[in-house]
Amino acid sequence: MKFNTKTIHGGQEHDKAYGAVMPPIYQTSTYAQSTPGGHKGYEYSRSQNPTRHALEKALASIENGNYGLAFGSGLAAIDAVIKLLNPGDEVISTNDLYGGSYRLFTKIFERFGIVFHFVGMENANRIENYVNSNTKLIWVETPTNPMMNIIDIKSVAGIAKKYDVLLAVDNTFATPYLQQPLDLGADIVMHSATKYLGGHSDVVMGTLIVKDKELADRLYFVQNASGAVCGPQDSFLVLRGIKTLHIRMQRHCENGRAVAEYLKAHPKIENVCWPGFESHPNHEIAKTQMKDFGGMVSFTTKGNNYKEAIKIVENLKIFTLAESLGGVESLAGHPASMTHASIPKEKREQTGIVDSLIRLSVGIEDMEDLIADLEQAIG
Ligand SMILES: *Cc1c(COP(=O)(O)O)cnc(C)c1O
């Protein structure tokens, strides 16, 4: 089955009871047993729920994995991965990372004795400098948020294999429509399904997808033991979202390209970060591992003018100033004061998140309206 067909049918079957084409929302916490242990595979909804299960099978299919797991948020999914580790274990992570992931690693898991190294991975070879016998996990985000750096997943996977270390890839920005990390050698794919997979800004959810049975069992143990599962209603919404992922992503990419090119030509704009530009330092890698370049574009104002940047985000009318990304509607964000405020200013600026940086999640509205909105806001 090819990708577009998979989003609609992959891992999915019609309801056995009445043939419902979409799985029912099994809004139940528990399941009747005929005799102790005599159940139909479902005992308690933290452990298993049929609607969540339907979603998890679809997730496995679109990421070319064998097992999917759905959690109450993207961070809950990341939390489950780090809980595979023990005190003293070390993690090598991308330095230009989603702020919430950085906060989870440094403010929660460092207290439990896990050691994190934050490394610029645009040149994958740099990772080897940080590998030692305690290294258990490499955590990669690509494209990175919000600088749109690209990391070569295949090269990092080679290093992970060489040292027998797990590789997890946060695939939230790319989605499996653009990039399939398991096929490139990653062990775990993670998503904030809140973003493109859900696609309609109406649900908070996280997911993990793996190929290996033993790894899936260990993650399932954490999912059940820690209990950060998502509810059946949310599972239904994300399953519905996935069915249009391919056509939404196609339009996100088209509009993203138009917006990036418009901004690049604008005299009041300084830098535009978008991996589709030939001048992007890892454009060639982006071209090999991604099918297209996505709908996320970041930019700075001329002379890194903070006031100018604030004026732009306040003036936008179709782009909504809001946290989050990946929905059908266009959003604008100011990372330094919003998504990345939890990263200290010096650390933030080292990775390029300066005070005039604006991040756009380009939606699927008419391109002409989006450009006109930017035109009036930038002035
Ligand atoms: C939003 C996001 C997360 C966190 O997911 P939540 O669903 O908000 O918990 C993790 N990684 C990336 C790249 C994100 O954009």
Image (tube, helix red, strand yellow):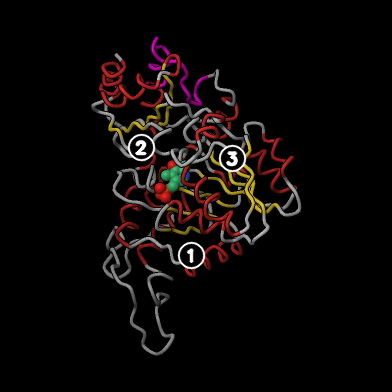
The location of residue 323, given as percent across then percent down, is 35, 39
Q: Residues within 10 Å of mark 3 (few under 14, many from 20)?
A: many
Q: Out of 27 and 320, give the one closest to the viewer.
A: 320
Between the C-alphas of marks 1 and 3, the distance is 25 Å
Between the C-alphas of marks 2 and 1, the distance is 31 Å
Circles 1 and 3, Cβ within 8 Å, touching? The answer is no
User: Quarter of the image containing the C terminus?
Assistant: top left
Q: Which mark is residue 223?
A: 1
Query: Which residue is the site of mark 3?
Result: 94
Q: Residues within 10 Å of mark 2 (few under 14, many from 20)?
A: few
- Secondary element under disc 1, as helix, strand or loop, is helix
What residue appears at the point 46 percent right and 52 percent down from the top-left corner?
75
The location of residue 84, given as percent across then percent down, is 59, 61
Between the C-alphas of marks 2 and 3, the distance is 30 Å
- On the rendered structure, is 377 left or right of 168? left
Name the amino acid type tagged 3: Thr
Residue 203 against residue 41 in the figure, above or below: above
- On the rendered structure, is 217 left or right of 88? left
- Secondary element under disc 3, as helix, strand or loop, is strand
Name the amino acid type tagged 2: Ile
Q: Is residue 342 magenta?
A: no
Magenta span of residues: 259-277
The location of residue 179, given as percent across then percent down, is 51, 39
Circles 2 and 1, Cβ within 8 Å, touching? The answer is no
Residue 371 against residue 108 in the figure, above or below: above
